[in-house]
Each structure stands twice: as structure tokens, then as C-alpha cells.
Image: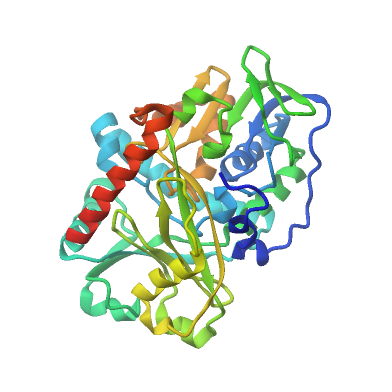
Amino acid sequence: MLSSDDPLVRNSYYEASTQRTDRYAPLQTDIACDVCVVGAGLAGLSAAIDLAEAGFTVAVLEARQVGWGASGRNGGQALVGLACDMQVVERQLGRTAARQVWDTTVEAVELIHARCRRFDIDSEWKDGFIAAAVTPRRAGELKQWVDTLAHDYGYDRIRLIERAELPEWIASSRYRAAAFDAGSGQLHPLKYTLGLARGAAGLGVKIFEGSRAIEVRPGRLSEVRTAEGAVHCSHVLLAGNVYLGDLMPQLASRIMPVGTFIAASRPLGAERASQLLPRGAAVSDTQWVLDYFRLSRDHRMIFGGRVSYSTILPARLPQAMRRRMLGVFPQLADVPIEFAWGGYVDITMNRAPDFGRVMDNVYYLQGFSGHGLALAGMAGRMVAEAIRGTASRFDLFAGIKHREFPGGRWLRTPLLVMAMVWYRIRDILA
């Protein structure tokens, strides 16, 4: 795993473009509260906010710093939907329940806007997202997806972009077709996460940085221990995802850490940047091993796409990311990469989110599978609802069943690497 002094953490554009003005001391004693949240990312902070507003006392334990994990280092694309196709949910829960899940993801984006207004967060939000197809087969699948969303899910904020129209959206010859989603968008994830922490602290939430949870002792009155203290509480929320490590081994077997990497170019200038993405929308292709990109407020190209399923960090990351960027925008051949960073996301076997309970009063949120920037906040809200006594929405998501990765602790990573090689071949042949 990445450590706090790893260059892939230090060389984040988000950290370089953000000032951490709020610091939170480590836990150094025993305390009592209603709810202990493990992980000061989007999910944990969102739950803490709703619980505090409902009158609960809340403590948040963060192993490193607020937003240190995926919440503060992701691609910045806040999207409706899930990482998996909605048919995965339909097959398990039926069409009606799948529609409820979809509508909740739409509300997840609306929650971002509400939180920015509530806590005066300048998240650098920009409307619009483009899903782009590289091959004719993917173009056909994209059209079917848009039709399904309109017909089965009542989602009318997305429309097809025909190939002849594409230059008005993306200055690249790589794509065959695309779809524009006006309900999704992009933001600066670290600024947003830090804003949520400020909002939570202002509501009385106690946030402790540098306070890794090393043991959870569930019970009617649970105990969460750190190296220097403990939290005694009625409810626990585990929201550290892949960074929980061995804290709860029975959860770790259902997710796989996947390294994902992003680069930021030097500033392009407003005119040149607008030539690349004339409408300013964030973009992701629909390949299994995908590229995604957007423009920052200071006109950099933020480009993500390389992944590591083996947990081996790539050598010469800036150069590798630049090659991927030039594969989409060869006209940037004169533009260097100024930042390159990475981290881990937690994927499930079916790419659907994995929410549930370890026992009645110990909740967990994991398995966002790289699609959690919007959904994580909503997941935190659903846990808060459940703790308050209204668990219908949380239980809906918890009803999605998951399998453990095959191969056990030692063989599951090699097996996944072999599977991903096959999917990459499918991308090439599609």
C-alpha cells in the first residue's frame, strides 16, 4: 500500500492546489459518543454530518489526514449510476428495486450541490459528463444504454452525440460515438472533502487525524481502539474501504485493491484548453480498462487511465501517463506532465457497491469500484438514516449479494491479473 511519504501521494495536483488550513489532533485518551466513524473520507464525513444534525455525538477516526485516500485523490468525476451495469442489480433485486437504486444515485449528485451550499464549499463544480465509445460495438452498446435509461429508469438528462457532432465536444479522432449526461459533472475532490470536514467539525463532530483504528470490539456498547486511545460507542461505521487493511478480515475478502493513477499537465491556457474540450465536460470512455479526463479550473488536462491489478506500482509514472494522454490528444505532444499520483480503489467481483452490517450496530461501506465520488456521500446518508431508525434505503443496497474473490489471500491477486489480461484483449478486439 501507499504510505504517507510515497511520491505518488506527495505529487498529487489536488494537494498542491489546496491549503489544509484545518488540523485535527490525534486521539490520545478514551472517549464516549453515540457513533464512531472509521475513515474521514466522503462516506464517513457525510454520515457524520447527518448524524450530528440529528443530535448524535460523533467521533471520526482517520489513520492519516482527512481525504488522504480515494476521496481526496480520485479523478474528480461525480457521476450518477454505479460502476456496474444496472442489469447486475436487476437480476438480483428486480426492475422496481433497481429503479430505486438508480434514483438514489441521482440524488447523490444533488446531495453534493446541497452540501456545497450548506457549508459554502468552493468545490470547483462544473456540469456535464461524456461517455465515449472507442469501437463500433461499444457505440452500439452506448446507444442501447441511453435508450434503457430513458425507457426503464426515466432518466432524461442524457442524450446521444453522433460521430459527426463529436468535434464540438472532444478534439480527438479516437471516438466513434458518445453520450452527454447533464446530470453528472466534475469537481476538485480534495477541496470538497476538506469542506465536508470543516462542516462536520462545525456541527460538533470530533475528528481525529493520525488515529488508525487497530481493533473493533463489537457489542451492545462497542469499542474502537487506536494506539493511544479508544472510542466507546453505540454504533460503528467502517468507512475506510480498502485502507481498513485487516481491521475486519471478513470484509476484506470481498474487495480487491486496484491501483489507479492520474496525471495533470502543465497549464494549457484557456484558449488551448477549450479547443480540446469545447463544452468543458468531463469524459470517460467505455472500455473495460478505461481512460478518463477533464480540465481543471487552471486549464490543466487531468488525465487518468492506467491501473495496476497486481498492486505493483508502475515505474516512470509521468511518462506512462503522458503516453496515454497523447493516445487521445496527440496535439499535446509539446506539453509536459507536472503532477502524477495514484492510490487504491476497492472493487467487488460484480462491480456493485457492498454495503451492510457486521452485526446490528456495526455498519460498513465499501466496494464503490471507482465510482464513489457521488455515491459515497449518499451511502453515508443512508447509514445515518439506518442508525436513526429508517433503514429502508440502506437495506435496499445491502440486499445486493457479493461473492469473495477466488484464490484466498495469496492467489486472488494473480487470478485477477490473469482475468484483466483477458478483458484488455477484449477491449482491443471489440
Closer to us: 335 or 14: 335
Side of 235 where 381 appears, left or right: left
Q: Position of residue 328 (x, y in %)?
A: 35, 74
Report the residue that reaches farthest toward the right: 29
Count of all numbered marks drawn on residues in the image: 0
Q: Identify the residue at image location x=55%, y=53%.
A: 112
Q: Quadrant of the C terminus?
A: bottom left
Is residue 247 in view? yes
Q: Identify the residue at image location x=43%, y=83%.
A: 333
The quarter of the displayed image where residue 223 is located: top right
Closer to us: 110 or 328: 328
Vertical comparison of 270 with 109: above or below: below
Q: Identify the residue at image location x=53%, y=37%.
A: 241
The quarter of the displayed image where residue 393 is located: top left
Vertical comparison of 357 with 136: above or below: above
Q: Position of residue 20 (x, y in %)?
A: 74, 57
Q: Identify the residue at image location x=30%, y=36%.
A: 89
Is residue 85 in view? no
Closer to us: 127 or 11: 11
Q: Position of residue 94 (x, y in %)?
A: 25, 32
Q: Position of residue 221 (x, y in %)?
A: 68, 14
Side of 155 where 334 appears, left or right: right
Report the residue that reaches farthest toward the top: 220
